[in-house]
């Protein structure tokens, strides 16, 4: 009976307005930011397809605008497959990842990201897709290591340019990455997303 009670407690759902994400054996409760909702209807399949090409990460949570706007904003929560069972403190992660972001090797890896995304989206959509971007490391603080910039996804029939921002951090001993996307041609638009991601990261428990 004690085991059953413990199992029930561990599997208890989060309150309304929050979602539980499981990283290995660790349970994290992620508040849903104002204005965002879980995907529904056709959006469910769209976000499943969006996550499919990213084989190096587990997409733990996808959120879209409750009321659609011209910005077509959405949020993603991910963690690297290789880090699912790796215990790390926030201080350790920020130092290790922050230092790595300053190396030429990391700059080269980030330069290769659009090409890798292009290949994945081409497989996903079944038509040639090219992703170009101007994004890279955007510093660190006591909560996140940041990346940000602008990315354009283009097919023969359509094109979308987005502000892209990311916060990589650790919560409850596990690495977690938060990403925000919003349609914009402004090369500086990502800067408005970074403090929002920091506040979101601080709210996870």
Image (cartoon, helix red, strand yellow):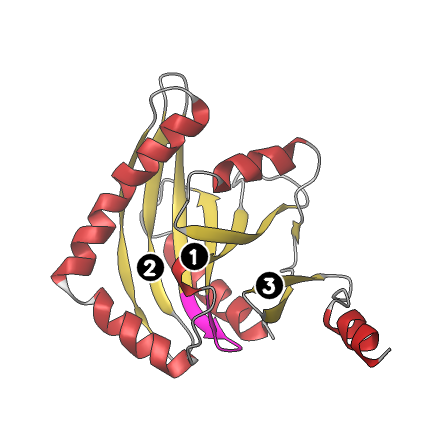
Q: Residue at x 34, y 55 (%)?
A: 148
Q: Residue at x 26, y 55 (%)?
A: 136
Q: Residue 118: where, in percent of width, then height?
A: 32, 33
Dot 1 corresponds to which residue? 81
Tell me: residue 154, above or below residue 90.
above
Q: Tell me how far mark 1 sits from mark 3, CA to CA.
A: 12 Å
Dot 2 corresponds to which residue? 147
Q: Tell me how far mark 2 sits from mark 1, CA to CA.
A: 19 Å
Q: Earlier in the sequence, mark 2 or mark 3?
A: 3
Please tell me in which quadrant of the rendered image residue 175 appears. Answer: bottom left
Q: Earlier in the sequence, mark 1 or mark 3?
A: 3
The quadrant of the image that shows the N terminus is bottom right
Q: Residue 60: where, in percent of width, then height?
A: 56, 55
85 within the magenta span: no
Dot 3 corresponds to which residue? 22
Of tags 2 and 1, the one toward the viewer is 1
Q: Main secondary structure of the magenta part?
A: strand
Element type at marker 3?
strand
Looking at the image, residue 11 sits to the left or right of residue 54; the answer is right
Looking at the image, residue 181 sits to the left or right of residue 43; the answer is left
The segment highlighted magenta reads 168-175
Element type at marker 2?
strand
* Proximity of marks 2 and 3: CB atoms separated by less than 8 Å: no
* Proximity of marks 1 and 3: CB atoms separated by less than 8 Å: no
């Amino acid at each position: 009976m004690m085991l059953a009670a413990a199992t029930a407690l561990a599997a208890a759902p989060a309150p309304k307005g929050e979602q539980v994400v499981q990283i290995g054996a660790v349970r994290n409760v992620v508040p849903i930011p104002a204005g965002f909702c879980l995907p529904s209807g056709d959006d469910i399949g769209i976000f499943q397809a969006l996550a499919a090409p990213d084989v190096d990460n587990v997409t733990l949570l996808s959120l879209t605008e409750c009321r659609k706007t011209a910005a077509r904003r959405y949020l993603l929560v991910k963690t690297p497959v290789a880090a699912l069972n790796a215990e790390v403190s926030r201080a350790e992660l920020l130092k290790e990842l922050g230092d790595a972001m300053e190396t030429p090797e990391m700059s080269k890896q980030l330069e290769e990201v659009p090409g890798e995304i292009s290949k994945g989206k081409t497989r996903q959509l079944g038509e040639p897709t090219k992703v170009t971007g101007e994004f890279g490391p955007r510093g660190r603080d006591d909560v996140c290591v940041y990346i940000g910039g602008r990315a354009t996804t283009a097919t023969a029939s359509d094109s979308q340019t987005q502000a892209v921002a990311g916060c990589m951090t650790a919560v409850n001993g596990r690495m977690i990455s938060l990403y925000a996307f919003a349609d914009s041609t402004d090369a500086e638009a990502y800067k408005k997303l970074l403090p929002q991601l920091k506040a979101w990261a601080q709210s996870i428990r």
